Amino acid sequence: MRAVFTPHRCGTPELRMTPMIDVIFLLLIFFVCTASFQQSEEMLPTNMSLPESSLVEVPLPDPQHLDAVRLRLTYDGRPRWQIESLSCKTAKDVRFNLGRLAAVKRSLPVIIDADDNVPMECVIDLYDWSRLAGFTQIQFAAGTPQ
């Protein structure tokens, strides 16, 4: 048998799409498999102090004897915070005291108990401050049915 050679045409080169589509699908599969579908938290730590803020050393309950940190949030035109039995006047006081508790026992669950009239942004701020302090178990208190 004799092999028959056909001369190669000299002309415009032909662009084959099948290998390019294969590469695109392989890249797509790679990115889907390596993607992280966890929603990123948009917390940026800042060091802002308000003009009326003050930092006062107040005794907190001993975290070793607590089973959870209870944060009470009320609102009467402006937010009012209470950590266990300690009333905090400013947001800076809340962040400072949460940091003090987390430094001793970070594994404590935090329970946020907000009144019905508290704006959602205040509740989210309190949640973010708890996360920034280092607490990982943050829960919300459920109201009793009326």
Image (cartoon, helix red, strand yellow):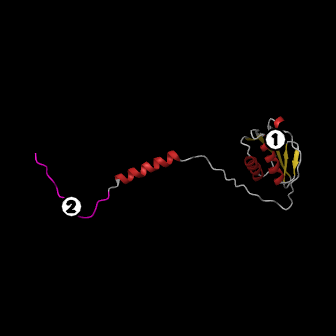
The amino acid at mark 1 is Arg
Residue 140 is tagged as none
| Quadrant in the rendering for residue 135 | top right
Compare residues 20 and 64 and report the one nearer the observer: 64
Q: What is the secondary structure assignment of the residue under circle 1?
A: strand
Which quarter shows the C terminus? Answer: top right
Q: What is the secondary structure assignment of the residue under circle 2?
A: loop
Residue depicted at 52% across the width and 46% down the height: 34
Compare residues 123 and 37 and report the one nearer the observer: 37
Q: Which residues are magenta?
A: 1-15
Mark positioned earlier in the residue sequence (2 or 1): 2
How packed mark 2 is, by other alpha carbons closer than 10 Å (few <14, some 14-19, many 20 or more), is few
Question: According to the image, label 2 marks what residue?
Answer: 9
Q: Position of residue 19 (x, y in %)?
A: 35, 52
Residue 70 is tagged as 1
| Quadrant in the rendering for residue 114 | top right
Q: Residue furthest bottom?
A: 11
Residues at marks 2 and 1, CA–CA distance in whole angstroms: 81 Å
Q: Is residue 115 left or right of residue 29?
A: right
Q: Residue furthest front?
A: 104
Q: Position of residue 3 (x, y in %)?
A: 13, 49
